[in-house]
Image (spheres, rainbow, N blue to C red):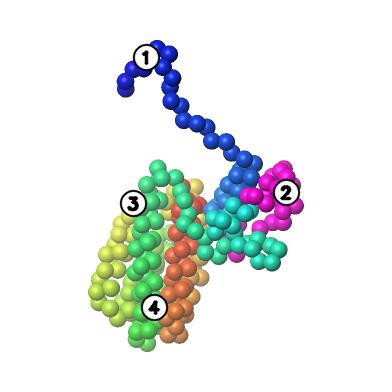
Amino acid sequence: MPLRAPGERIPFAKVARRTISEEVRDALLASVREGDLRPGAQLPPERTLCEQFGVARTSVREAIQGLVSLGCLVKRGNRFYVAERLPGVSFDAADGRKLRVSELFEVRQVTEVAIARLAALRAEPDQRAEIGELAAGFDPSMSLEAFRRQDRRFHAALARACGNTTLRELYAKVLDAVFASGDFASLLAAEGNAEAVRQVIAESCRSHRGIAEAVAAGAPDAAAHAAAEHLGEVERQMTARMF
């Protein structure tokens, strides 16, 4: 490190000044990211927020408008609601685990949504029945280990039913990467993430049944939508609520 001459000024970075509205905005955004305010939930009235934060209504309104600009809130009539499809969740760049987990979910979105759509179009009757049986085998009370085994069987069955050998072989590598990922496993196994993991399992039970029902009905758009929604919710839980 080079030495400075006596009396030479040190170039300190300027300190950013935060307004009250920015602090309110960030507090509300944290509630959204942590799941206290879930997608579709109505935001408390301005008066309630003013009382809870102990700030003027102007600050609350500026905070809300900031979240509307970010795409986190939408206005319906005179009320504000958490957006059904939230913009990308930001997280500490130092946590490389979440970055790698997010990358895995990007690949899963590309492959699993297409697989669900094709399975709904092409699956044989016995394959549709197998997918339904596997979906019915999920239970919110099952252990994490049992859930992951059932999860892999379910998605492998969908891939077999998609009628595309190349896609099935490609997806087998995706599954291997997901289940071999130490980053994925460490987030799920962390003691402090137990509540979020239970929510992931419960949500997955519902979502897998929805995917299976769409496949059984031969509804490709519904199957693809259910798969995309499921992956988006699990990614949000893992990148926003787990640590």
State which mark lies toward you, 1 or 2.
Answer: 1
Earlier-in-chain disc, 3 versus 4: 4
Instruction: Give me the disc on residue 117.
Output: 4
Where does residue 145 sit, x and y in percent of width and height? 40, 60
Closest to the observer: 137 or 87? 87
Amino acid, disc 1: Ala
Label 3: few (<14), some (14–19) or many (≥20) C-alpha neighbours in 10 Å? few
**Apparent side of residue 232 relative to residue 41 in the rendered image (left or right):** left
Front disc: 2 or 4:
2
Q: Residue 5 carries which label?
A: 1
In the image, what residue occupies the spot 46% across and 30% down? 13
Measure the alpha-carbon separation of dots 1 and 3.
Answer: 49 Å
Q: Position of residue 76 (x, y in %)?
A: 66, 66
**CA–CA distance in space, label 3 to label 4:** 30 Å
Q: Is residue 220 above or below residue 195?
A: below
Q: Earlier in the sequence, mark 1 or mark 3?
A: 1
Residue 57, label in figure: 2
- Nearer mark to the viewer, of 1 and 4: 1
Q: Which of marks 1 and 2 is nearer the N terminus?
A: 1
Residue 182's disc is: 3
Residue depicted at x 44% and y 69%: 228
Kind of residue indicated by mark 3: Gly
